[in-house]
Amino acid sequence: MTSAHYDRPPGASVDGPQVALKILIAGGFGVGKTTMVGSVSEIRPLRTEEVLTDVSTGVDDLSGVEDKSTTTVAMDFGRITFRDGISLYLFGTPGQQRFWFMWDELAYGAVGAVVLADTRRLTSSFASIDYFERRKTPFVVAVNCFDGARRYSMEEIRGALDVDPDVPVILCDVRERNSAKEVLITLVEHAIHVG
């Protein structure tokens, strides 16, 4: 699966069937969901980011992301089209618990999800993993390798998150387009395999 963004000139036709798949990008607050959508989207991503204010003090846990100044309050949206005619519509979920009520609407019709994880705050991934396990939505865990964060083996991460052996767990840097793209390819392949 190769990306149309790099592999096809603008306006060129795509051979084969056109397939649109809805994918969720989920995870805890400040884990890189907005960054991932932005790094792979072939269109200017829709973002619903707002500046964090004093009102969120005591409500939002900024542990490990003290320098974060904005937050997604509804969703992020982007699109990536691959040469084989598959378009992925990416919906980044809000990370804070106070916005989780939107997840059911965002998840409607999704074929799979990426759960982004941060090894400095793995517990922030539990809610997303539980959500997709309960809904029986295929998902992968993508560990976003933040600068300065301690590195762990895939077995250690899998054990800490207590995910089933068939759930792919991969390392990534969502700032890098190719790395984020590989996460999406892994998810689509996993969703096809389990579906």
Image: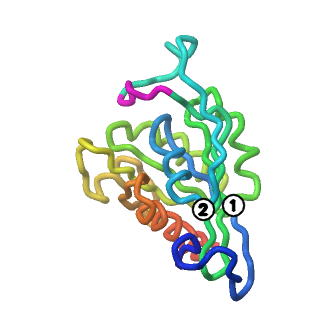
Picture quadrant of residue 74: top right
Q: Main secondary structure of the magenta part?
A: loop
| Mark 2 residue element | loop
Q: In this view of the protein, which residue sits in the foreground, 191 or 15?
A: 15
In 3D space, how far apart are the residues under numbered discs 1 and 2 (Cα atoms)?
Answer: 15 Å
> Any mark on residue 42, and which?
2
Above or below residue 124? Residue 87 is below
Q: What's drawn in magenta, residue-wise? A: 64-69
The residue identified by callout 1 is: 22
Q: Quadrant of residue 113?
A: bottom right
Residue furthest out toward the front: 10
Could you tell me which secondary element the residue under label 1 belongs to?
Answer: strand
Q: Which quadrant of the figure has residue 172?
A: bottom left
Q: Could you tell me the amino acid type at mark 1?
A: Lys
Q: Is residue 58 magenta?
A: no
Residue 162, given in percent of the width and then of the height, sits at: 41, 51
Is residue 179 or residue 191 the one in the foreground?
179
> Along the horizontal axis of the image, is 149 left or right of 73?
left
Contact between marks 1 and 2 (CB within 8 A): the answer is: no
What's the residue at 65%, 36% (across, down)?
48
Any mark on residue 89, and which? none
User: Around disc 1, counting alpha carbons within 10 Å, would you say few (fewer than 14), some (14 to 19), or many (20 or more)?
Assistant: some
